[in-house]
């Protein structure tokens, strides 16, 4: 049998976009996925994709461009190993969003009602539902329409290598030959040993990402002499609903909600964002409580995941701070004092330095949700160039090997969670997936010629 032009290991957004791009460029491609259900971390996300300078922004009268996005994300991330990658993502993200909508028919719309963490203008494009599952479903429909083979429940055991060149992979006991391989297996968040080694500050937190994120790409890459980058960076989430395990929409916090501890008092600035704030929640105790009001509840109900959380009874209500504290099991005196001061005229400046108080002060009836911090995905991985080719630590590339998504280094800084901006993971996955698909097919056809 003739080798595939591209074998893709992993069926998240990176792998699906890579497969579609390779197929449409005239390549032979197949996808294998270890889990029974495709989608990986992409389906667990909000499906938010930054697009700097997209036609959707222009239609909304929003001025933006790649340089502004680079400046925004650089200011947040600080030093990192992926300057060229950041510029690539900023340059390609708007064309990617337009390709997804115009060519593939993916359901995306520009979010204009608020700006999320790290972005100075409204540049996130997301499904109307704010559910990553909808994005994955649309991409899967494109894969099906193109008759691209996708095998689930098929774990890759190791890469096939001859004379230093990757030439396929061992899949469920059988060798699959390919001229190029794209590692789209996500990161190492589900590998406690690697998390403890590289991201110790969040190692005690529960992992809420896709279970297939066991660090296979990192392990295989190291065996081939690949370089690693940004290994201590990760995306946390400060408010995972307990015990449901679903993320609480950050809209509630961003527009004026707060987080308090068992004593009913705040412990950090919510302006830090859902990722950077996760370690502060972890430091103050196993749980925290998100406090908001009926105005914020109504504003967030159009988001399907939040509506579901509300329908399942996770949101507690009361007309008084004392009543809400009793319902949540937190200190009533502390919560009463917190709500009396927060955003009120008697408080000169926020004691934690929060700049954007949203709709504060909060007004009765009050609402609260029990949450806990979590690790969602790691942001370090194999170093890649702007064609998504895996780089060697001694220089040059690992022949025929590409990486994207959590398998590759991200754009969120070298260390910690504070450098993570909304959409960083998904946009890096999709831009690198598209670059890998196009580059691999071009390389395969050049070699064949």
Image (cartoon, rainbow, N blue to C red):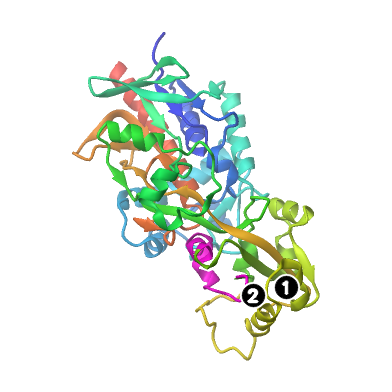
Q: Is residue 265 magenta?
A: yes
Mark positioned earlier in the residue sequence (1 or 2): 2
Q: Which segment is the magenta one?
A: 261-282
Name the residue located 75 percent from the left edge and 77 percent from the top edge: 322
Name the residue located 67 percent from the left edge and 62 percent from the top edge: 370
**Count of residue discs:** 2
Per the model, the C-alpha gap separating discs 1 and 2 is 7 Å
Across and down, in percent, residue 294 comes to 76, 69
Q: Is residue 197 left or right of residue 333?
A: left
- Say above or below: 97 vs 137: below
- Say above or below: 370 vs 176: below
Name the residue located 37 percent from the left edge and 20 percent from the top edge: 168
Residue 70 placement: quadrant: bottom left
Label 1 element class:
helix
- Say above or below: 67 vs 194: below
Across and down, in percent, residue 425 comes to 47, 48
Q: Is residue 257 visible?
A: yes
In the depicted view, which residue is nearer to us: 246 or 61? 246
Label 2 element class:
loop
Across and down, in percent, residue 102 comes to 57, 40
- Say above or below: 315 vs 55: below
Across and down, in percent, residue 256 comes to 63, 72
Q: On the rendered image, what quadrant is the N terminus found in?
A: top left
Q: Are marks 1 and 2 in contact (CB under 8 Å)?
A: yes
Structural crowding at the residue carrying mark 2, measured as other residues with C-alpha within 10 Å and reported as few (<14), some (14–19) or many (≥20): many
Q: Is residue 194 left or right of residue 97?
A: left
Q: Residue furthest bottom?
A: 346
Q: Which residue is mark 1?
A: 325
In the depicted view, which residue is nearer to us: 88 or 240? 240
Q: Is residue 384 magenta?
A: no
Q: Which residue is mark 2?
A: 264
Q: On the rendered image, what quadrant is the C terminus found in?
A: top left
């Amino acid at each position: 049998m003739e080798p595939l032009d591209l074998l893709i290991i992993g069926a998240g957004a990176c792998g699906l976009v890579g497969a579609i791009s390779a197929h449409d460029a005239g390549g032979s491609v197949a996808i294998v996925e270890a889990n029974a259900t495709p989608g990986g971390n992409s389906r667990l996300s909000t499906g938010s994709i930054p697009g700097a300078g997209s036609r959707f922004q222009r239609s909304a009268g929003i001025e933006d461009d790649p340089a502004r996005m680079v400046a925004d994300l650089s200011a947040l991330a600080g030093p990192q190993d992926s300057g060229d990658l950041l510029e690539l993502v900023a340059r390609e993200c708007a064309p990617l969003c337009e390709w997804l909508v115009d060519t593939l028919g993916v359901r995306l719309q520009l979010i204009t009602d608020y700006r999320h963490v790290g972005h100075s203008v409204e540049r996130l494009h997301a499904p109307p539902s704010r559910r990553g599952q909808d994005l994955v479903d649309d991409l899967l429909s494109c894969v099906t329409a193109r008759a691209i083979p996708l095998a689930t429940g098929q774990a890759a055991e190791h890469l096939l290598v001859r004379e230093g060149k990757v030439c396929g992979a061992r899949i469920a006991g059988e060798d699959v030959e390919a001229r190029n391989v794209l590692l789209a297996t996500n990161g190492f968040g589900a590998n406690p040993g690697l998390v403890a080694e590289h991201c110790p500050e969040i190692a005690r937190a529960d992992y809420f990402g896709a279970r297939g994120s066991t660090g296979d790409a990192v392990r295989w890459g190291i065996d081939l002499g690949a370089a690693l980058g940004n290994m201590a960076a990760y995306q946390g989430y400060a408010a995972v609903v307990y015990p449901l395990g679903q993320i609480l929409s950050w809209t509630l916090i961003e527009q004026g909600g707060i987080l308090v501890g068992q004593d009913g008092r705040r412990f950090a600035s919510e302006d830090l964002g859902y990722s950077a704030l996760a370690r502060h929640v972890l430091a103050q105790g196993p749980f925290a409580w998100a406090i908001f009001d009926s105005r914020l509840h109504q504003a967030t109900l159009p988001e399907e995941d939040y509506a579901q959380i509300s329908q399942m009874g996770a949101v507690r209500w009361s007309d008084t701070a004392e009543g809400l504290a009793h319902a949540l099991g937190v200190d009533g005196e502390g919560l009463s004092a917190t709500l009396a001061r927060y955003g009120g005229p008697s408080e000169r400046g926020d004691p934690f330095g929060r700049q954007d108080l949203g709709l504060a002060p909060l007004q009765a009836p009050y609402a609260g949700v029990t949450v806990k911090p979590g690790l969602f995905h790691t942001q370090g991985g194999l170093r890649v160039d702007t064609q998504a080719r895996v780089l060697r630590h001694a220089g040059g590339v690992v022949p025929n090997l590409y990486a994207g998504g959590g398998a590759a280094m991200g754009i969120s800084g070298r260390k910690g969670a504070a450098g993570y901006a909304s959409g960083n993971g998904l946009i890096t996955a999709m831009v690198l997936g598209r670059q890998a698909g196009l580059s691999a097919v071009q390389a395969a056809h050049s070699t064949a010629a």
